[in-house]
Image (spheres, helix red, strand yellow):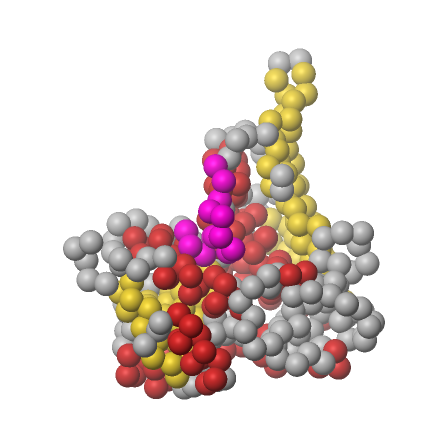
């Protein structure tokens, strides 16, 4: 292409970097040069660089930003570090793709977007569910009024025994929270997007730590916790370090008049893993997995199952589509799919979920 290639660097070389971001950027080799990786674990950073043909590896991301001067940076570190690294990358002149959740509170997310404005750079949040074909189809149906007025939604993301045991997900010091930040943020973002980003009015929730801080002696796999590949140097796991929630549930009131019931877990005694979102409207209902529209046709009730184009046959294919979209946005060819107001609406929800659980009451949001 005629445009100059973008220099891309990655901060954090854990699972999501190796399984999602790195292959997504390598797929754009005609437009992107993956020039550097940084990780506090220098050995792992060097291993990734050697394996993937990346010329530079650092154990100090600040030095990487100063010396490489990348055009775009992927932030793939634990949640607590997103803010500092994102703002530094923006101030160094890079656009930023930050893993979800963008920050550990709404106020920090606002500050990060303001830093992007001041730097004249784009801040992208990796809410990758939006780039999967069944979500694109669902959005088309909702926007076309196939559901009528949506008045209720149920969001479920339940693993039976799927605690991420390879890193620092289970440690508040590094990740700030548990499955709500890991799984729930994706599903809430997707739901709000489908509904046109209604404002959150109130949240009532509870969080639980019942299984994650126990040694059950169970044999589990990385695949059960969402890491089918990409874990190169797993950190030794100790259940005694587990100090976040392993399950959360609650109820959300939206300014559209709709209400949302949600539940999410890394560990719960359910019969099988459960991931689905259900929307109920006056003209139809929708389930996302599998994608089925329940409606009426004349005098008959019908279930409509569309032939949706298949997603790419690669792990974390949403990251691949997101990377392509980001490239077009940076080049001024299209507008960002994920808007600031949408991200901040989700962040307000996350804040209220934990505040409600802590205070034991419904939280109303101004």
Q: From the viewer's perspective, is 230 left or right of 212?
A: left
- Asked whether residue 162 is in view, the answer is yes
Q: Is residue 16 above or below residue 287?
A: below
- Measured from the top left, where is residue 14 in percent x and y? 52, 73
Question: Residue at 27% across / 77% down in the picture?
Answer: 69
Question: Residue at 33% across / 63% down in the picture?
Answer: 122
Please identify the residue farthest to the top as the structure is shown.
299
Question: Residue at 52% across / 51% down in the picture?
Answer: 129
The quadrant in which residue 357 appears is bottom right
The quadrant in which residue 110 appears is bottom left
Q: Which residues are magenta?
A: 309-321
Quadrant in the picture for the N terminus: bottom left
Q: Is residue 209 above or below residue 271?
A: below
Q: Is residue 61 above or below residue 177?
A: below
Please identify the residue farthest to the left as the structure is shown.
2
Q: Would residue 216 be counted in the magenta stretch?
A: no
Q: Is residue 130 above or below residue 304?
A: below
Main SS of residues in magenta: loop
Quadrant in the picture for the C terminus: bottom right
- Measured from the top left, where is residue 125 in percent x and y? 44, 61
73 and 50: which is toward the camera: 50
Question: Residue at 55% across / 30% down in the picture?
Answer: 306
Number of numbered callouts drawn: 0
The quadrant in which residue 26 appears is bottom left
- Measured from the top left, where is residue 232 in percent x and y? 54, 74
- Asked whether residue 279 is in view, the answer is no
Q: From the viewer's perspective, is 76 left or right of 227?
A: left
- Measured from the top left, where is residue 363 in percent x and y? 66, 62
25 and 181: which is toward the camera: 25
């Amino acid at each position: 292409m005629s445009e100059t290639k973008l220099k891309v660097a990655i901060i954090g070389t854990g699972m999501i970097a190796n399984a999602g971001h790195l292959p997504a950027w390598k797929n754009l080799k005609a437009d992107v040069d993956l020039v550097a990786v940084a990780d506090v674990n220098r050995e792992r950073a060097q291993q990734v660089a050697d394996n993937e043909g990346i010329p530079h590896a650092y154990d100090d991301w600040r030095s990487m930003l100063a010396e490489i001067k990348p055009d775009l940076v992927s932030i793939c570190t634990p949640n607590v570090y997103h803010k500092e690294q994102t703002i530094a990358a923006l101030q160094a002149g890079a656009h930023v793709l930050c893993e979800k959740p963008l920050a550990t509170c709404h106020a920090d997310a606002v500050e990060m977007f303001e830093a992007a404005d001041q730097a004249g750079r784009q801040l992208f949040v990796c809410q990758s569910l939006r780039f999967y074909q069944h979500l694109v189809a669902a959005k088309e149906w909702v926007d076309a009024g196939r559901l009528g007025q949506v008045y209720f939604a149920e969001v479920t993301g339940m693993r039976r025994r799927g605690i991420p045991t390879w890193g620092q997900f289970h440690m508040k010091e590094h990740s700030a929270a548990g499955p709500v930040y890991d799984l729930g943020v994706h599903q809430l973002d997707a739901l709000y997007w489908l509904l046109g980003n209604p404002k959150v009015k109130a949240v009532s929730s509870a969080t639980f730590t019942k299984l994650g801080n126990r040694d059950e002696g169970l044999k589990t796999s990385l695949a059960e916790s969402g890491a089918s590949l990409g874990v190169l140097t797993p950190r030794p796991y100790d259940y005694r370090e587990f100090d976040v929630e392993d399950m959360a549930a609650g109820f959300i009131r939206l300014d559209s008049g709709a209400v949302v019931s949600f539940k999410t877990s890394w560990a719960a005694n359910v019969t099988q893993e459960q991931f689905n979102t259900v929307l109920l409207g006056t003209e139809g209902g929708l389930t996302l997995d599998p994608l089925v529209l329940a409606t009426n046709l004349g005098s008959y009730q019908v279930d409509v199952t569309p032939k949706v184009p298949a997603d790419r046959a690669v792990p974390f294919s949403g990251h691949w589509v997101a990377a392509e979209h980001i490239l077009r946005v940076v080049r001024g060819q299209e507008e960002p799919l994920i808007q600031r107001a949408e991200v901040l609406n989700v962040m307000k929800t996350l804040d209220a979920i934990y505040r409600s659980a802590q205070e034991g009451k419904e939280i109303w949001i101004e």
